[in-house]
Structure formats: structure tokens, C-alpha cells
Image (tube, rainbow, N blue to C red):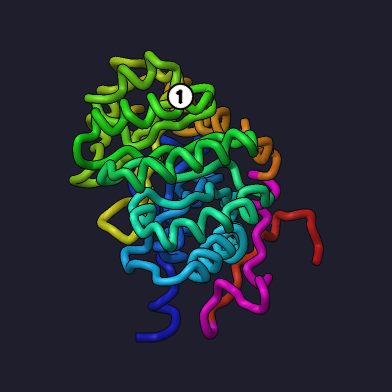
Amino acid sequence: MTEKDLQPLSYSPAYLDKIKGMRFFDPHVHMTSRTTDDYQAMADAGIVAIIEPSFWLGQPRTGVDTFRDYFSSLIGWERFRSSQFGIKHYCTIGLNSKEANNERLAEAVMEMLPLFIYKEGVVGIGEIGFDDQTAAEEKYYRAQLELAKEAGLPVQIHTPHRDKKKGTQRSMDIAIEHGLDPHMVIVDHNNEETVKEVLDRGFWAAFTIYPFTKMGNERMVAVVKQYGSERIMVNSAADWGISDPLAVPKTAALMHESGIDTNDIHLVTYRNAITAFAQSGQINEADFDTVRDIDQSLKFNGSTVLRGGQQPRVNKNSTIIR
């Protein structure tokens, strides 16, 4: 095996023909857990921008400095790494519900959050909400809603896997109780059981296409056929689990095959997410084009996305000369 054999493959699956020319925005994907090959495949499939919410890493964190490094990575290295594949990277910052149960650590993270939520490219507080629906989770959910209100930022809510309907209703009730406008709140990980109430109450309804545990994209097609495209958005939430960072373009292709109108596909896989998170004042679509002028010879704090001997990819059509 030679170095050439180890280079990323360039391929064009058949579904890409169905969505040729379309642009996609994945408003929930944990790229810290993914490889550069995923970035390459996402760019090839038409994904032009993403949002990376703060997340738990599987391994419990033992000190606040690990959060500091993680948040710094979201607004630093990961944003750079994404740009090296022509994808604009935004993030939401918050204390994840699962980690709210370590109250000693949670208090320290809460003190640190104001240092990060006002940074460039931070488009919301997230992902926050309930996991096991404990008293500690509610305490820090409420505190972060107040933080979002004070900062004028949208909120990205994680709804629990267990007892989802109750957790979703409770999340919305508390958001209203704290005076948040439903239009500033994106309720994530919806399913057929929750979607009607979320839409009826004026919130944004996000759906995660994630194998086995959340939604399949055939079910997503049925949801859009029943409820339309207003205030609905699709994401991958791809992370270190069995997940698919191409879930958004694949779902768009399936919608196209199923006869859903092109404008509705555009709304649920691109436009609605931009409208919701642009309320942060941090999203300018013109930046999507700028970041596509890639030059992988660039470095971030002395580091590059290239590993020993790999050749940089440079957009030779760019008018920028460095």
C-alpha cells in the first residue's frame, strides 16, 4: 500500500444526481467527533454551512478546563478545519443536560459561559434541556434560558430520549415561563409524537435523522407531507455514535424522489435553519461563498489539516492571491 492509496477517495453516489445544484445547511452536527473525510464528503454533497452544538464527549469530564479547551476548539480549530473543506462553521455554546448533573462542575461552567457566548460565530445557547429530567438539569436549563435572554441569542433545546413527549412539553413550558419568544427557540430531536404541539405553540421543530434512536428519513418525508415546511428543519446530529453526516442531503434526495416540492425541500434542509439562527445576528450567507475559496496550505496556530506528506487542495478558480 502506498501513500496514494491512503488519500481520500472521490466518488459520486447516485443520490447526488437528484440534489445536484442544491445547497444544504446542517444545523446540528458534532464535527469534533468526525474525520476530515466526512468534511470532504459533506462539501461534495452540497453542504455549505453547519452548526456544531456543545456536546458531551462520552468520557466524563473531571475539570472545568476541559470545557474551556472544548469551547475554544469549537470557535477555533474546528472552525478552521471546516473552512479547509469550504464549509462555513458556526456553533452554539452551553452546558449539556447530561453534564448538568455534576453540580460542582456545572457551577464552574456556568461562570465561564459568558466568556464564550458573545464570540463571533456563536449563534445560540445549546444544546441544553433535559436528559433524565432531574432537578439539576432543570436548574441549569433555567439558568441558561436567562443567559440566552440576556444575550439576545436563540436557544437550541435537546429533548430527552426517554419520556420524550413529557420532556418536550416541560421544556416548552419552562421557556415560556422565562419569557422567551417561541420564535427564538429551536426544539430539537422531534418525532411524530411531539411535532404537532411544538408547531402549534409557535416553536421551531428540528428533526434529527439518526439511525435506530431518533428519526429515519422515510418517516421524515411523511412528516413533511403531513405538516408542510413551515418552521421545520432537518439535521444529522452526527457524532461519535453510529450516525451519518450526510443525513441532510440524503433526506433531501429522498424527498425529491417522493415528490415533495423543491421549495419545501429548500426550506427544511437550508432556509429555515438560517432564518432561525440568524436571529443571533451572526449569520451572513455571503460568508458561505467566501469560505469556499479553500487553501489547505493554511495553518491554525501552526497546525494544518494535512497529515505528513498529504498534498494541499487549493481552489485555483479563486481570485484571491496569497
* Count of picture labels: 1
Is residue 293 depicted above or below 73 in this figure? above
Of residue 79 and residue 201, the one placed in the foreground of this image is 201
Which quadrant of the figure has residue 168?
Answer: top left
Residue type of the residue flagged with mark 1: Glu
Is residue 296 depicted above or below 139 in this figure? below
Q: What element carries label 1?
A: helix
Please tell me whether the stretch drawn in magenta is mainly helix, strand or loop. Answer: loop
Residue 212 part of the magenta segment:
no
Of residue 98 and residue 299, the one placed in the foreground of this image is 98
Range of magenta residues:
288-309
**Relative to 246, is 167 on the left or the right?**
left
Residue in the picture at 57% in, 41% down: 147
Residue hosting label 1: 177
Residue in the picture at 45% in, 38% down: 142
Quadrant of the rendering where the N terminus is positioned: bottom left
Visible in this render: residue 41? no
Q: Position of residue 230 (x, y in %)?
A: 44, 18
Quadrant of the rendering where the C terminus is positioned: bottom right
Visible in this render: residue 54? yes
Residue in the picture at 53% in, 50% down: 93
Which quadrant of the figure has residue 62?
Answer: bottom left
